[in-house]
Image (cartoon, helix red, strand yellow):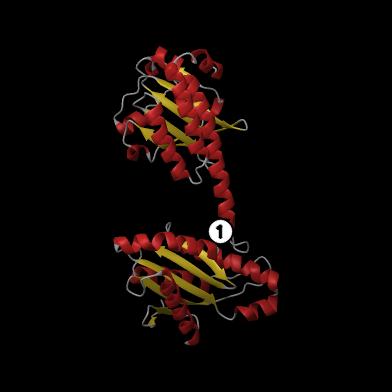
Amino acid sequence: MWQKEDLLDNMADPGQLDRLLTCIEFSKALLSAYDMETLLTAVLERIKSLIPADNWSLLLVDHQTKELYFAVVVGVDPEHLKGIRLQMGEGIAGTVARSGKPVFIPNVDQDPRFSARADSATGFNTRSIIAFPLLVRGEVIGVFEVVNVEDEKFFREKYLPLLTILADYVAIAVDNVHNLQKLQARTFIDEVTGFYNPRYLACKLDHLLPLVLEKKEFFSVAFLDLDDFKHVVDTHGHLLGSQILGEVARVIHSVLRPDDSLVRYGGDEFIILMPQTSQEEALVVVRAMRRAINSTSFLPKEGINLQVTASYGIATLPQDAQDREDLLRIADRAMFRSKGRGKDGIMVGRDLTPAPVE
């Protein structure tokens, strides 16, 4: 349909040379991005200045669902497109993602592949689309669309060869960020339970707590430590002990809400992070957690059916603490006071108030 060699045919055009140099600078900015937000911001800012189009979008493939989602949108309110996901083969973008080949649709009303879902959500009227895939090692990781090009002949001659080059750079940059995210994710995962580790805890709190304090929101943490777990390990061995920790973590996770995070802090101690959660709300979550653990038989496949309990401590920002260290220290102290009072209990806050269990 179009070739990168077309760019060379226009090198006598000073404007085309300027655009090529801008494209090279753009590629440097992309390849220096280390997180998706920075990368997508660079794409948005640079392509707006480089390509004369009022409406364009960058869709990326969700690795888990294999659906396309709108990562960057120009010309309409992106909030209206947040919930829209396109299946492979759905619409023009889905067609390009499935085939791996670029397409130009001069009149979408005459093309049965066109999906009007995005137009219905935004009130926009799509007339024409130029779309091409983002390819990495032969795999489509996204689709770039330019919509309603006014002077199609001029655009194809002057800008399409440039956009194919940019698409290659965007694809490489997105792939680099994904690979870095995978590497970073592995450093935040506890090998025994598959949930988060203390590295994640420190990074998450350092990022969230300043925002929480600025917005004057609640933020609660809960510590829990399994009761008499040393006796369990001495009786059943370290391998089964580690297996119990994994089972306990899954039970805890089953009662958490979508924004809560589970961290294995070390040994048989866990921390739960609960954003936008008051102390009263945190107590509801911890009580549900306690009921779930106490009612579960662990190592059932091994025929052991072990019962375990835990001791819990809760602390909340801003009423108990103003920084990460105090928040964790107070929750930890509350948990140890709970253990000292007879175990299988819940202590709350700086004042170490015992919470009635239910």
For residue 346, what is the image quadrant?
bottom left
Mark 1 is on which residue type?
Phe
Q: Of 224 and 217, which appears nearest the observer? A: 217
Q: Position of residue 14 (x, y in %)?
A: 44, 17
Q: Of 147 and 80, which appears nearest the observer? A: 147
Give above or below for 154 relative to 204: above
Give above or below for 189 relative to 156: below
> Total marks drawn?
1
Give above or below for 178 relative to 6: below
Which SS class for mark 1?
A: loop
Q: Which residue is mark 1?
A: 188
> Who's the residue at 32% across and 73% down the image?
319
Q: Position of residue 199 (x, y in %)?
A: 54, 63
- Tell me if residue 7 can be seen: yes
Q: Position of residue 198 (x, y in %)?
A: 54, 65
> Who's the residue at 35% across and 27% down the image?
55
Which residue of the protein is positioned furthest toward the bottom in this rendering? 341
Q: Is residue 72 left or right of residue 33?
A: left
Q: Is residue 165 left or right of residue 260?
A: right
Pick the quarter of the image with the C terminus: bottom left
Q: Position of residue 18 (x, y in %)?
A: 44, 23
- Tell me if residue 303 can be seen: no
Q: Residues within 10 Å of mark 1 (few under 14, many from 20)?
A: some
Q: Of 216 and 25, which appears nearest the observer? A: 25
For residue 245, what is the image quadrant?
bottom right
Q: Of 10 and 175, which appears nearest the observer? A: 10
Q: Is residue 285 left or right of residue 98?
A: left
